[in-house]
Each structure stands twice: as structure tokens, then as C-alpha cells.
Image (cartoon, helix red, strand yellow):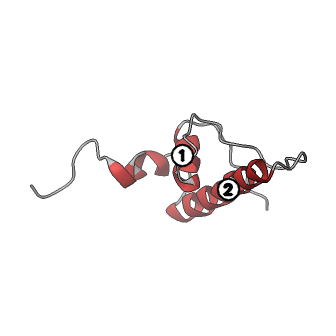
Amino acid sequence: MFGTTPHPEGITSPAIDDLLEKVDSKYTLVVYGAARARQINSYRQEMKSGDQNITNIGPLVPALPEAKPLSVALQEIDQDKLSLTVEE
């Protein structure tokens, strides 16, 4: 079957169209998601090292330890767990 399906699975979950409704452009989504994914990755590294000085905030949605940080970040954006502020 050709075309798109109404409820895609896999790498497109959450759906890109849903995520684009949360930001003003696809470029903003990329930067926003990547920045949050770096924070999640840093948090996981801090937890793994046993460092008592945790400086990053962990996932705000239920996530398995093997979940990719970018997938977790996009789920957070989709569930409105984050707010984006633009500095001028």
C-alpha cells in the first residue's frame, strides 16, 4: 500500500505533524528537541557515574533506560511537559 497511514508507528511516534503544532517551524523543533535530548543524555551519564552533584533534569515522561534521549525529548514536547521561550 502506498501513501501515509493515519497513525504511523515506529520512528514517527509521536507524529511529526503533531509536534509541528507545538512550535513555529521544523527548525525550531530540531533545535528544541536536540537541546533537551542532550540534557537527558547528560542526566543519564551523571546518574551512571554516581555523581552526587546532579545538574540536569531527567525525563519528564515515563521512559525506559534504553529509550533514546531524542525520542524521550520528543515525547516530552508532544505531552506539553516543556515550555519554549525565545530570547531576543
Q: Quadrant of residue 27 in the image? A: bottom right
Q: Which mark is residue 22?
A: 1
User: Callout 2: 10 Å neighbours few (<14), some, many (20+)?
Assistant: some
Note whether 79 is above or below 20 in the view shown.
Answer: above
Query: What SS does tag 1 mark?
Result: loop
Tag 2 near tag 1, CB within 8 Å: no
* Left or right of 3, for residue 14: right
Q: Amino acid at mark 1?
A: Lys
Q: Quadrant of residue 14 in the image? A: top left
- In x, y percent, where is residue 83? 68, 43
User: Callout 1: 10 Å neighbours few (<14), some, many (20+)?
Assistant: some
Name of the residue lying farthest toward the right: 53
* Left or right of 53, for residue 85: left
Q: Amino acid at mark 2?
A: Asn
Note whether 6 is above or below 27 in the view shown.
Answer: above
Query: What SS does tag 2 mark?
Result: helix
Quadrant, the N terminus: bottom left
Q: Report which residue position mark 2 lands on.
A: 41
Q: Residue at x 29, y 47 (%)?
A: 8
Give the CA distance from mark 2 to mark 1. Answer: 23 Å
**Label located before the other in sequence (2 or 1):** 1
In the depicted view, which residue is nearer to us: 47 or 29? 47
Q: Residue at x 12, y 58 (%)?
A: 2
